[in-house]
Amino acid sequence: MLLLCRFAVDPADAPAFLARGTRALELLTAAEGALDGRLGRAVDDPGRWVLAVRFASVDAYRRALSPFPVREHVVPLLSEALADEPATYETLVDAAAGTATEFPSLLA
């Protein structure tokens, strides 16, 4: 399961957004079933950011969103994400060190 949220952030607000995104990653990746997370800024447009977190399953993703600190700090941040495309994706292929592993679709 992949959570992928894009944000439009005024460059003047970048330090505050970085702090909020860092806190969100700390909370989300502390959850059981969270695999890893990243916060990045576009090289060619410093006003565009992305938050990506991988979870072992849909259930792990849902559980990660339930603790009070997550609802207090992370959910408001996620609500600011650009809403013109989906934010949650199933993982169909994982790759590391030149080897790809395919997973069955949860939708099939």
Image (spheres, rainbow, N blue to C red):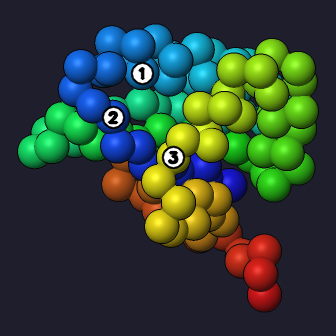
Secondary element under disc 2, as helix, strand or loop, is loop
Horizontally, residue 53 falls left or right of residue 12, namely: right
| Quadrant, the N terminus | bottom right
Q: Position of residue 93 (x, y in %)?
A: 54, 66
- Marks 3 & 2, CB-CB < 8 Å contact: no
Which residue was labeled with disc 3? 81
- Point out which mark residue 9 bears: 2
Q: CA distance from mark 3 to mark 2?
A: 10 Å
Q: Alpha-carbon neighbours of circle 3 within 10 Å: few (<14), some, or many (≥20)? A: some
Q: Position of residue 107 (x, y in %)?
A: 77, 81
**Residue at horizontal 79 percent and vertical 52 percent from the top:** 57
- Point out which mark residue 97 bears: none
Note whether 54 is above or below 105 in the view shown: above
Residue flagged by tag 3: what amino acid is it? Ala
Q: Earlier in the sequence, mark 3 or mark 1?
A: 1
- Marks 1 & 2, CB-CB < 8 Å contact: yes
Q: Position of residue 88 (x, y in %)?
A: 64, 59
Which of the two residues, 47 or 1, is positioned nearer the viewer here?
A: 47
Horizontally, residue 85 falls left or right of residue 103, namely: left
Which of the two residues, 26 or 14, is positioned nearer the viewer here?
A: 14
- Point out which mark residue 17 bears: 1
